[in-house]
Image (cartoon, rainbow, N blue to C red):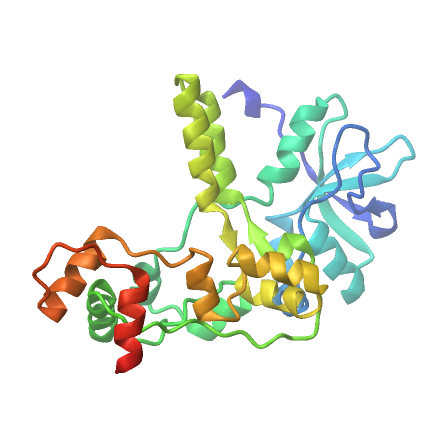
Amino acid sequence: MEKFNDLAQTRLIDIEQLEENAGQLAGVPENPRTIDEDRFALLKQDIIDYPEYLKYNPLKVYQLESGNYIILGGNMRYRALTEIGYKFVPAVVIEHDTPTEKLKAYAILDNNGFGVWDWGKLKSGNWDAKQLQTWGVELPDNWDTSAADAENEQSQNDSYSRKVVAPTYEPSGRTPSFGEMYDTTKRDALLHEIENADLPDDVREFLRQAAGRHTVFNYAKIADYYAQASPQIQALMEQSALVIIDFDKAIENGFITLTKDLANAYRVERDITDEEALTENDIAEDYDEE
């Protein structure tokens, strides 16, 4: 507890003395976070509606040799506050003798959310959907589905189906940044655990490769980027299954595979008793006949 005996105090700092983290502090990379226009508008409105929350969640800054302060936590809020017209901003000044590695850690920790929403508890708590969205919560598509309908939908999803419904995205015309197209939060947390675990080298490498599966892709943003990319980049994105323009081509590229379980289910459905191996073409041709 002695680490908290000398707590930093929040102070009001002239907004003219604040600088976004653009990599100007040696050893600390520039702010890796970005925000799209819609969510930035929500952030500004939240500050307008709840300005007092800033004193409970102030910016985290570090004083530069010039006397100005670099923002390590709160770069997006700073932009919003600037546009709204604030002259002074509540901030906590990080101690000047803080090691660079800790400053880097603080910049990420301030923006990182380790938890995930329990949608069931949110629904049972009678939270208002519109309010949650104005507070920046991205609700799932089935938020308005009743509990019974959700359970029935899940049951249907658990059953094998040969009906393929692919999501479609209408490009917005805006080219997103790469940071908007994917989120490595879960992957990075898993990699951190893997690196700190006592594991044989071959197991560690295997788990490193597997951790890549936890990168989350924003396919709506990817569609925006794809729509304005060069033909070469578009082709590579299709080969990587980031965008599927031709479903049959995706099959040829090997992104849709037939597992043993699915093959067995197909045999039962078609009353096939022979042991001859089935291929994707066998099934594709059968469906085409229907």
| Res 10 seen here | yes
Q: Quadrant of the C terminus?
A: bottom left
Q: Residue furthest right?
A: 66
* Nearer-the-camera pick, 171 or 269: 269
* The quadrant where residue 103 appears: top right
Whole-percent x and y of residue 5? 58, 23
Q: Is residue 74 above or below residue 195?
A: below
* Nearer-the-camera pick, 281 or 4: 281
Whole-percent x and y of residue 203? 39, 24
Whole-percent x and y of residue 132? 47, 67
Q: Residue at x 74, y 32 (%)?
A: 28
Q: Residue at x 43, y 72 (%)?
A: 129
Relative horizontal placement of residue 232, taking residue 168 as reference (left or right): right
* Nearer-the-camera pick, 227 or 238: 238
Q: Residue at x 79, y 40 (%)?
A: 70
Q: Residue furthest bottom?
A: 290
* The quadrant where residue 143 appears: bottom left
Relative horizontal placement of residue 290, taking residue 3 as reference (left or right): left
| Res 146 seen here | no
Whole-percent x and y of residue 206? 42, 30
Relative horizontal placement of residue 7, taking residue 285 as reference (left or right): right
Q: Residue at x 57, y 53 (%)?
A: 182
> How many callouts does the rendering have?
0
